[in-house]
Image (cartoon, helix red, strand yellow):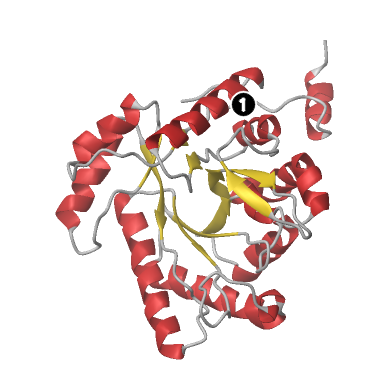
């Protein structure tokens, strides 16, 4: 048996597994209802303990309170409020309107008690809001993103929710090192990480070595991770590199590593299924994640 001092030293060296917490899994539901209580109960019926925020307007305080209370009663956390607007749109008026919308979504996340509001940094592409552009990897893009994140946070001053952006394969931040640099540059307690590891897979080396990419993300970003996405990637064989998003289990992402790392994350961060089309597809992805989690010794809340 190890002494306490030896145990702490071994743990610091990564030789002793960190304590694992149950993972909160969530995803979209297909119940046609505006009743927050019914929506919360449907999440629990499906085995979800995390949820995307139901439709709500910032000005509707009564509905926000009803959503907050109904989901708390079912012990289902609201993982995220999506913003999904281009904060770097080339058109100045559009950019200002988008930034205002994102700020309102951040305020909604704070009001409803969501873990985070999430967006991407944006793009300088003239027509596709998330599209590739040479300047998306520039210092100008980085500096503008720092300014935008600060503006959103300083306007809302969130106390419990966090503002986050996702990595993208062709825009900053495009990996854990770039995200860590952004965290330090933004320099706000309310800025955090929404982790979508598939978005960081932008080369054959990262595709084949995705387990190491996953470990690198959690090693460097773990203290700031507040929510995650669950997807999978398949390599479509063509004359150039083409990765296709697929149902979890149909691709080559190392979910045993992903789930094990998430369970040891210092902050409880829900895992949210996304980008599928039907209830059956979500059920397939959910069952794969639950099965793989059991194989990896991971529990679910």
**Which percent across, then down, holds residue 15?**
83, 27
Horizontal side of residue 160 vs 298, given as left or right? left
Q: Residue furthest bottom?
A: 92
Horizontal side of residue 12 vs 243, given as left or right? right
Q: In this view, does 274 lie above or below 136?
A: above
- Residue 183 in view in this figure: yes
- The picture quadrant where one finds residue 27 is top left
| 221 vs 258, nearest the viewer | 258
**Which percent across, then down, holds residue 77?**
38, 39
Q: Residue furthest front?
A: 238
Quadrant of image for the N terminus: top right
Residue at position x 73%, y 57% from top?
202
| 75 vs 92, nearest the viewer | 92
Horizontal side of residue 32 vs 277, given as left or right? left
- The picture quadrant where one finds residue 279 is top left
Label 1 element class = loop
Q: Is residue 12 above or below residue 277?
A: above
Q: Is residue 145 above or below residue 43?
A: below
**Which percent across, then down, holds residue 248?**
58, 36
Horizontal side of residue 148 vs 110, given as left or right? right
Circle 1 crowding by C-alpha within 10 Å: few under 14, some 14–19, many from 20: some
**Which percent across, then down, holds residue 165?**
54, 61
- Residue 159 in view in this figure: no
Q: Is residue 72 above or below residue 141?
A: above
Label count reads 1
Residue at position x 23%, y 52% from top?
64
Residue at position x 75%, y 43% from top?
210
- Judging by the rendered image, the residue that carries numbered circle 1 is 20
């Amino acid at each position: 048996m190890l002494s306490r001092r030896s145990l702490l030293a071994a743990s610091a060296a990564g030789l002793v597994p960190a304590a694992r917490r149950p993972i909160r899994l969530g995803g979209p539901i297909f119940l046609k209802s505006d009743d927050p209580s019914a929506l919360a109960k449907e999440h629990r019926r499906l085995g979800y303990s995390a949820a995307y925020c139901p439709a709500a307007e910032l000005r509707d305080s009564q509905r926000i309170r009803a959503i907050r209370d109904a989901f708390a009663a079912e012990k289902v956390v609201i993982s995220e409020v999506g913003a999904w607007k281009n904060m770097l749109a080339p058109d100045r008026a559009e950019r200002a309107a988008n930034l205002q919308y994102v700020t309102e979504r951040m305020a909604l996340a704070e009001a409803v008690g969501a873990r985070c509001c999430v967006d991407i940094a944006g793009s300088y592409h003239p027509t596709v809001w998330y599209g590739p552009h040479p300047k998306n990897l520039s210092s100008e893009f980085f500096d503008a993103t720092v300014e935008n994140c600060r503006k959103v946070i300083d306007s809302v001053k969130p106390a419990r929710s966090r503002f986050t952006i996702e990595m993208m394969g062709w825009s900053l931040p495009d990996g854990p090192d770039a995200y860590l640099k952004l965290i330090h540059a933004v320099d706000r307690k309310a800025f955090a990480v929404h982790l979508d590891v598939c978005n960081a897979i932008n080369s054959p080396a990262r595709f084949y070595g995705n387990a190491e990419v996953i470990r690198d993300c959690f090693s460097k970003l773990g203290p700031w991770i507040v929510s995650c996405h669950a997807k999978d990637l398949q390599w479509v064989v063509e004359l150039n590199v083409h990765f296709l998003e697929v149902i979890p289990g149909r691709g080559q992402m190392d979910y045993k590593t992903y789930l094990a790392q998430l369970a040891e994350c210092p902050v409880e961060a829900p895992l949210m299924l996304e980008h599928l089309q039907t209830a059956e597809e979500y059920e397939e992805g959910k069952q794969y994640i639950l099965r793989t989690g059991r194989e990896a010794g991971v529990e679910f809340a």
